[in-house]
Amino acid sequence: MRTEDATSALPDADLDLTAIRRTLESQLAEREEKIRELAPHAAPHIDPAAWASLAGARRAVEQITGALERLAAGTYGRCIRCDGAILPARLEVLPSAATCIDCQNRAENA
């Protein structure tokens, strides 16, 4: 069953895009600081936990940056795979979400 309709309008009427931008910018600053702290000490053979944390922080930066770019382009809230609307509840929980629930589930189960 499809949970999000690709023909539905963008959810921006239901979202405070200014607040979302601030949240994303704050998350970006936090992750960039974490990268600065971890980078000098993270090596897979010396500190695997720091290495994994560094990799996770870098992935998060990519996702957050992508969300900020979608905000600037006016495509925030649209799935990058199917172009369907991403539910506002999903974006509230995960502001950097790039895909709708259906596409995310398909990607995880592929």
Image: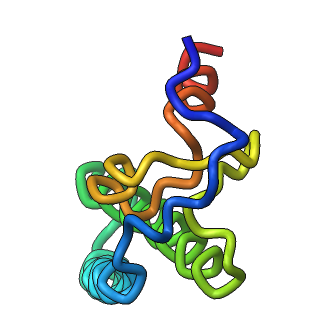
Question: In screen coordinates, is 100 left or right of 38?
Answer: right
Residue 37 in percent (x, y) is at 25, 84
Above or below, 13 relative to 108: below
**Residue at x 75%, y 40% (from the top left corner):** 82
Question: In screen coordinates, is 101 left or right of 71?
Answer: left
Q: Quadrant of the N terminus?
A: top right
Question: In screen coordinates, is 48 left or right of 4?
Answer: left
Residue 17 in percent (x, y) is at 42, 81
Residue 2 or residue 72, whichever sits in front: 2
Above or below, 95 relative to 68: above
**Residue at x 38%, y 65% (from the top left corner):** 14
Residue 101 in percent (x, y) is at 50, 33
Residue 53 or residue 82, whichever sits in front: 82
Above or below, 44 relative to 39: above
* Among the 4 quarters of the image, the one containing residue 56: bottom left
**Residue at x 67%, y 79% (from the top left corner):** 74
Q: Quadrant of the C terminus?
A: top right
Count the marks: how many? 0
Above or below, 88 relative to 95: above
